[in-house]
């Protein structure tokens, strides 16, 4: 990536069951299982959907 900034657009609490195949694909993963293998830490009781975008300098 070139120099720039990551800008957080939103942070929303969600349930683990809200993580769908479509959300996983939108997030760059092939499946829910692949997303959770990277993103899940601990018990997974607090789950957040964080949307962000890149802004070049």
Image (cartoon, grey):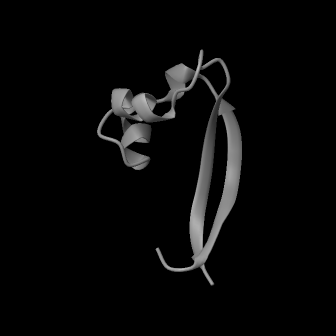
* Quarter of image, res 33: top left
Q: Residue at x 60, y 51 (%)?
A: 51
Quadrant location of the C terminus in the rendered image: bottom right
* Quarter of image, res 25: top left
Front in this rendered view, residue 44 or 26: 44
Residue 14 image point, x, y percent: 63, 29
Q: Residue at x 41, y 29 (%)?
A: 37
Q: Residue at x 52, y 27 (%)?
A: 40
Residue 41 image point, x, y percent: 56, 25
Residue 53 image point, x, y percent: 58, 64
Q: Is residue 8 above or below residue 11?
A: below
Q: Is residue 3 above or below residue 8?
A: below
Front in this rendered view, residue 42 or 33: 42
- Answer left or right for 5 relative to 26: right
Residue 48 image point, x, y percent: 64, 35
- Answer left or right for 1 relative to 54: left
- Count of labels shown? 0
Q: Residue at x 35, y 42 (%)?
A: 29
Q: Residue furthest left?
A: 30
């Amino acid at each position: 990536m070139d120099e720039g900034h990551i800008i957080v657009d939103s942070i929303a609490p969600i349930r683990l069951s809200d993580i769908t195949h479509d959300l996983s694909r939108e997030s760059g993963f092939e499946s829910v299982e692949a997303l959770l293998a990277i993103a899940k830490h601990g018990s997974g009781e607090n789950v957040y959907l964080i949307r962000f975008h890149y802004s070049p300098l």
